Amino acid sequence: MRLLFWGTPAYAVQTLSALHDAGHSIVGVVTQPDRRRGRGKQLVPSPVKQRAEEIGCPVFTPERIRHDSACQQQLADLQPDASIVVAFGQILPRDVLQQPPLGCWNGHGSLLPRWRGAGPIQWSLLEGDVETGVGIMAMEEGLDTGPVLLERKLKIGLLENADQLGERLSRLTAELMVEALPRIEMAGPGSEAERWRALDMRFQSDEHTYARMLQKGDYQIDWSASALSIHRQVMGLYPGAQTNCKGKRLKIQSTEPLIERLIDQLSPEATALIGSWPTGKYEPGRVLAAVQDLGIVVSSSGCPLLIREAQLEGKSRSRGQTLVQQMQSEVGSQLG
C-alpha cells in the first residue's frame, strides 16, 4: 500500500519502521518541525524525522497543518492509499482526513474510550489502571472518537514506569498496525459508512475519560498523599516527579510503596522492610531511614515509601548505595 505516515516522538518510530519493513511504500512522512533543545538550544529533528531520513522517505514539517494549505496540497499530490497516524501532535482537519481513499488510521495507546487525548500512558499509571492497551482507530474530526478496528490489552506492572510501559505499547502499536492494513486494503474504497461496515468496527461508548495535558504542578509531590498515590505519580511522570530537599530539587525516579497487601508485586528487598515503621506515627515527608545498598525510606499519610532512585539538584542520578551515601545526612529531615 501507498502510505502517508504522521508521527513525531520515539513512540511512533517502531510503527514507521514496521510498515517500511513489511514492504509498504511510505510516500511521505509528516512530523513536527525541528525544535531547540538542550543547553545549547540546538535545533533537533524529531525521532520520526531522523528515522524517515534513514529509510529515504520525503519529510514534511508543517508548523500547523490545519492552516498550511500548500502543504495539504503537496500531501494530496502524493496520492496515498491511507494515512497512518501515531502520536503526531496536531489535530488533522477534515480536508486532510478525507484525502486518502482508504481512510486515516490512528494507533492510540489506551483502551478507548478510556484516556482519549494526550498522555494516555501517563494517566493510566497515575490513576492506577491494572491494564491498558492499543487500539487501531478510524480517525474522524473528534479527538480520538472514531470506531476501533483492532484492540489488544496489556497488564500494567506495579513497578513499571511510563518509559517502560510506553516501549511495550509502542511495539504493540507497530504489530497491530501491520496486522490491520491487509484488512483495510481488502475492504477497499467507498463511503466511510460502507468501509466501516465491511470492517465490522467497534463504535465507542459515550462514557469516556479524557487524558488532559499535564501541568507543571502535576510533577510536585504532595507527601500528605498515600504511599501508593505518590508511587503512581513517580512511575507515571517518570522521570520528572519532584520534591524539595533543604532548598534543592530532588527528582524521584523509582519507588516502592511498603504496603503489605501489595507484597506479591514488590521486590524481595522492599518486602523485607514492610512493618519496620509504624503507620501514621511520622509527619508526612519525613526521611525515616537510609537502608544499606537499597535507598531511603520516607513517610507518607499512611505506609512509608521506599525511594530507590533519585537525582539531587547538582548531582547525577543515583540509586542503591550511592543514593544512600548522598542522602544519609538527611535522615530525620523533611522533604517537600
Image (spheres, rainbow, N blue to C red):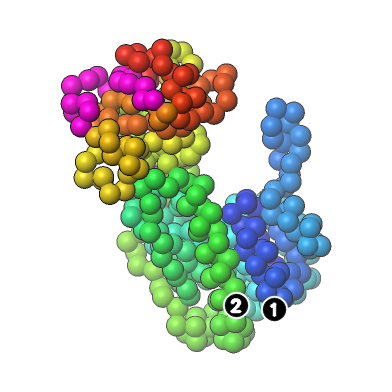
Q: Is residue 180 left or right of residue 234?
A: right
Q: Is residue 182 left or right of residue 111?
A: right
Q: Are marks 1 and 2 in contact (CB under 8 Å)?
A: yes
Q: Looking at the picture, how far across and down is residue 151, in whole percent?
A: 45, 70
256 versus 109 height, above or below: above
Q: Which mark is residue 1?
A: 1
Hey, which quadrant is residue 85 in on the image? Answer: bottom right
143 versus 205 height, above or below: above
| Residue at 56 percent of width and 76 percent of height | 179
Q: How many marks?
A: 2
Q: Looking at the picture, how far across and down is residue 131, in whole percent?
A: 36, 58
Stretch in magenta: 275-292
Q: Which mark is residue 181?
A: 2
Q: Is residue 218 visible?
A: no
Question: Which of the two residues, 201 or 22, is positioned nearer the viewer here?
Answer: 22
* Distance between mark 1 and mark 2 Cα atoms: 8 Å
183 versus 275 height, above or below: below
